[in-house]
Each structure stands twice: as C-alpha cells, then as structure tokens.
Image: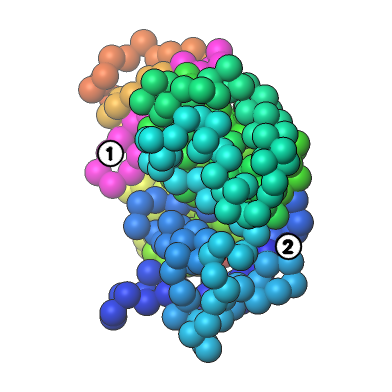
Amino acid sequence: MLELNYITKRFGKVEAVKGISLSVPDGAFLALLGPSGCGKTTLLRMLAGLELPSSGQIIFDGQVVSDGDRAWAVDPAKRKSGLVFQSYALWPHMTVAGNVNWPLKVAGMTAAQRQTRVDEVLRMLSIHTLASRYPNEISGGQQQRVAIARTIAPKPGILLFDEPLSNLDAKLRIEMRTELMRLHRATGATTVYVTHDQIEAMTMATHIAVMDQGRVEQFGTPADLVANPASAFVATFVGTPPNNLVPVVKNGNGFKVGGRHMAITPPSDHAQAMFRAESLGLAETEGPRTLPLELAEVSTIAGRTMVTGIAADIRLTAITESAPAARIGDTIHIVLPDHADAWFAPSGERIG
C-alpha cells in the first residue's frame, strides 16, 4: 500500500531525512518511532504532501504521489489520505457535526450522504451526543475524537497521525490507544503514526520503523525489534525497561567488562555487550561477575521490581523479584550472566 524509495529531505545544508526506503503492506499500522529531531515528523509531512522530498519517490497503492527527483507531487487533497494533527486543528466556529461534515461537503457528497456518514463516524467514536457542541465546549480528549472523526469521514486509504495523544493525560492516553487500535481494525486503513513513546509504538503497531538522525535504524514487527535489535540504538531505545549495554575492552590476556576483569570473550577486542534486564541479578556482596553501582532508582511494575544502578558512563537496570534493602545512593552489586544476549561494535552496529 505504501512504498518509500530512497526518500531524502534537505533544508539548506541539513539532511533531515536520509535515503529512507520502506515497503508497508496494505492495512498495516506503522509507527515511526524515535527521539525528537530524528526526522519522523518531516517524513510524515512528506507522506501528507505538505513537504516535497528533495529526492526519491513516495508511492500510494501503486501510484507515485511525490517524486523529489522531478520536483513533482500530487496535491495533498487528492492523495486519499487523512492527517490528524497533534494540536487537533478544529474549526472553532463550527459544531462537532459541522467539523466532520466539512470535508465531506468539499468532496462533493450530497446533504443526505453527508448526514449519514457524520452520524456513522460520530457513533463509531462515541461522540454522537456532542454533535451540536462547539470545540471550546468539550474536553481535550473529546476534541481529539472529533479530529479523528473528521479525518476518517471521507474514508481515506491512508491515515496519518502526528503524535495525536501527546496533549492528553496518562489515563486518557491509555484509553485513546485502545480506541485507535479499534478504529484501525474497523476502517482497515493503512495507518502511519508518529511517536517518541515506545510504549505507544509497541502496543499499537503491527510494524515499527525506529528512526535516529534522519535514518531508519530498523524496520520490523515489535517482536522483531525486541528479539533481534539491529543496532545499539534500537537495543537501548526499545523495550521496557530498555536493554543494558556494557563496554568490553581487551586488557592484557583478558577483558575488562565495565572496568572489571571478567571471563568473557567478545567477538572483537573492543565491543559492547548487551544484557536484557531479566538476565541481570543482584548480589549482597562483590563477586567475580558483579559490577558495583550506585543505586539510582527502584520501581515496581506488574509485580516485578526494576532496580537501576549507575557508575561513570554505565547505567544498568535489572528485573528482580523484590526490592533491595539498600537505599538510594548506596552501593549495590549487579550480577552479569556468563554470556551476553547480543554484541555491538563501538560504532553501534550489531556484530557476532
């Protein structure tokens, strides 16, 4: 349904998006996941037709809609796509029903057809009782539902979301995640969703493109990213808690792991060992496979305890059955397993 062929976007001398190629199947829910400034919103704006690629092609359902090499693009209104902004962007002088009705009127539907479709989408999003109210008379969560209703009313083939839940409180964000997944199933539209929140991406998406510095570090299913991170960035950005990285450096006839000699053999003289949080443990005293760290955080999630320790440039999180007796600031001893879960080069690519 959606193809990107070597998409690049430059703003002057700055490359915001660098040669991205993706193929997204029909009906997929794609999350563009990454930190602020990684290029995900710029990529979404190119999909929406609000920005023209500097080079490369964007293809919707087999048809080229943007060609940066020829400096040509299909008008945004003719792409059969719908965009939901972070700020909702509702017309304040129109009622809820009026906001949803307007794009249908622009599309040339009859009054009877528009009324039927407006009623349908308002009920789909459980806001039909708000039809006669104005945006300033409803809550932020309700405004977001109106913005979504307005977008899906013309039945676009591709839905685009630019961090639509970032303005909502934590409880409402969880509720709206469920609603968006239900909406995706109901409409069957291919969906592209921009977020910096990896929990949103992992719970909602069928496919994720993890972005950093204008590039896609890895593209795959949520399970793929967790099981087989392709780079150190993905390993430490995806997952709750994220994976742990520890530098391993050759020293004499052996290797130093986080500054301590340990019996471990990396695939090169200088590498980064990845340990999943569940692979680490806690010891009461120093041992042959422990690292002394300052206790920084203790939190309980789903009956398990996450214990985080820090030392210099190392930050490790272990999942344990119970909280340590130590207090914040005390020294704890985190136990490393015999084998790393994965290895990465100092530059970040996966090795071994």
Left or right of 46? Residue 190 is right
Near-viewer residue (288 or 291): 291
Q: Quadrant of residue 185?
A: top right
Residue at the image position 75 percent from the left and 58 percent from the top: 25
Residue at the image position 53 percent from the left and 89 percent from the top: 70
Image position, residue 247 (x, y; %)? 40, 53
Q: Callout 1: few (<14), some (14-19), or many (20+) C-alpha neighbours within 10 Å?
A: some
Q: Amino acid at mark 2?
A: Met
Residue at the image position 66 percent from the left and 72 percent from the top: 59
Q: Kindly tell me whether residue 158 is visible in this rendering.
A: no
Which residue extends farthest front?
111
Residue at the image position 74 percent from the left and 72 percent from the top: 62
Near-viewer residue (338 or 164): 164
Image position, residue 216 (x, y; %)? 52, 64
Q: Which mark is residue 311?
A: 1
Q: Is residue 75 magenta?
A: no
Using the image, determine if residue 295 lies above or below residue 191: above
Near-viewer residue (41 or 76): 76
Left or right of 233? Residue 113 is right
Q: Quadrant of residue 186?
A: top right
Range of magenta residues? 300-319
Q: What distance separates the C-alpha of mark 2 from that of mark 1?
A: 48 Å
Q: Amino acid at mark 1?
A: Ala
Left or right of 28? Residue 250 is left
Q: Quadrant of the N terminus?
A: bottom right
Q: Which residue is mark 2?
A: 1
For marks 2 and 1 on the same chain, the one whose residue lies earlier in the sequence: 2
Q: Which mark is residue 265?
A: none
